[in-house]
Amino acid sequence: MDKRILAVTVTCVGLLMCLLGFPSLAGAQAAPLVVSTEPANGASDVAPDVSRIVIKFDQDMVRDSFSVCLADDGDFPPVEGEAAFKDARTFVLGIGKLEPGKTYALRLNSPSKKGFRAAGSIERPLQPFTISFTTAGTSR
């Protein structure tokens, strides 16, 4: 009888925690997310002289692995300089001179390339994420 009461109590507490929004063990294993980018994703007035793209994640990432891929939404920016993690949650991609009035895009990970992934796991890659922005000015 005591075991049944304990089982019901544990089940009720677990259900209450889910309803109140407490993180679950499954939630702790969620895939990483991009929380911000510089330039901002979708921006339409980016200065053509911007020299890097900064990507911030919601959790610590594997720092020696990344996949920056082509995207269909624009031209791939000219990569120049660093492409590395600044810290466990911030990735920096150095870029060269951009053309005015042009849309640029890149994809983090792809269905076959899964370099961006949560620290301590190869099973929790970032879902493919496209970053695009358009530079200010008029195209030539």
Image (cartoon, helix red, strand yellow):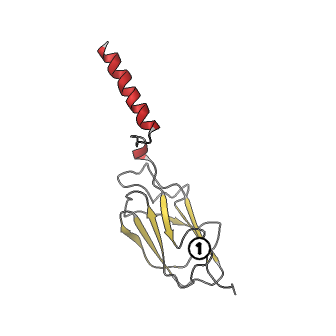
- Residue 9 versus residue 96 in the image, above or below: above
Left of 127 or right of it: where is 75? Answer: right
- Residue 15 versus residue 3 in the image, above or below: below
Instruction: Give the amino acid at mark 1.
Output: Phe
Q: Which residue is mark 1?
A: 76
Point out the image quarter for the C terminus. Answer: bottom right
Point out the image quarter for the N terminus. Answer: top left
Q: Secondary structure at mark 1?
A: loop
Question: Residue at horizontal 56%, vertical 55%?
Answer: 111
* Quadrant in which residue 4 is drawn: top left
Question: Residue at horizontal 53%, vertical 73%?
Answer: 39
Residue 13 pos. (x, y %): 38, 30
Left of 83 or right of it: where is 48? Answer: right
Outermost residue on the bottom side: it is 140
Residue 42 pos. (x, y %): 60, 69
Residue 8 pos. (x, y %): 38, 22
Residue 108 pos. (x, y %): 52, 63
